[in-house]
Image (cartoon, rainbow, N blue to C red):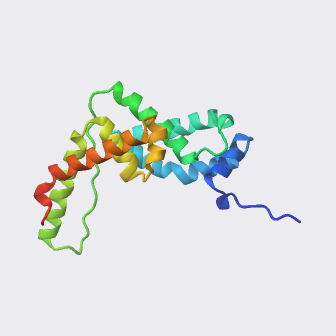
Amino acid sequence: MLIPLRLSALTDEQLMRRAAHGSDRAFEELYNRHARRLQGFFTRRLGSDADLASDFVHDTFLRLYAARETYCDGRSFRAWLYTIAYNLVKNHLRSQQPVVISDEKDIPDDCNIEVELDMQNLHDALSGVLKNLPEPYAMLFSLHYEEELTVPQIAQITDLPEGTVKSRLHKTMNIIKLQLKAYENR
């Protein structure tokens, strides 16, 4: 007797292969694994508009579902998912005015007031720097440092050479370091 394999034990790529062959349960498992993180990506990229981010999550998965039969074995599912997400954001931002990005985080209660103020000031300064980055740099920063995608995955998503991705990430970090130099020895 064969013991059925739990979907949660499968890799994203295995689930996508099953979804490509008609398994709605496999696709649902992929949605459950990635929707929340994708929601965060869209929220950060679209100016903290949670409703718009939710719409983009659903649109991403609708596009993924519609194209499920074209999934190629050996392709990273996560890179494919973020390629769709990246293109949705890129197209949206082209058609909009510049978007204000805000990513408020709670400061731990056990810090003393000076540390809390310093952390808040640093966070505000970093948010300001990220808001003022040119969009291609801000997008690469988000994909690499917030979504934790690798340089090869980002190159695949953005259709840029890996060297360009590395160069732009390096330039982005230099901009951030320069802008936050006042916080260096605090």
Left or right: 28, with 113 as reference point: right
Q: Give residue 62's quadrant in the image.
A: top right
Q: Quadrant of the N terminus?
A: bottom right
With respect to residue 17, does 121 lie above or below? below
In the image, is 11 to the left or to the right of 102? right
Residue 186 in picture, x, y percent from top left: 12, 66
- Residue located at (12% from left, 65% from top): 185
Q: How many marks?
A: 0
The spot of residue 56 in percent (x, y) is 46, 37
How far across and how far down the image is residue 109, in percent?
24, 71
Quarter of the rendering containing residue 111: bottom left
Q: Residue at x 39, y 32 (%)?
A: 90
In the rendered image, the residue lying farthest to the right is: 1
**Image quadrant in which you'd find residue 139:** top left
Residue 62 visible to the viewer: yes
Identity of the residue drawn at 13% across and 60% down: 183
**Residue 32 at x, y percent in the picture:** 57, 52
**Is the residue 81 above or below the residue 33 in the image?**
above
Q: Residue furthest front?
A: 163
> As rendered, which of 175 and 49 lies closer to the eye?
175
Give the vertical position of 16 relative to 108 (above or below): above
| Residue at the spot 25% in from the left edge and 39% down from the top edge | 100
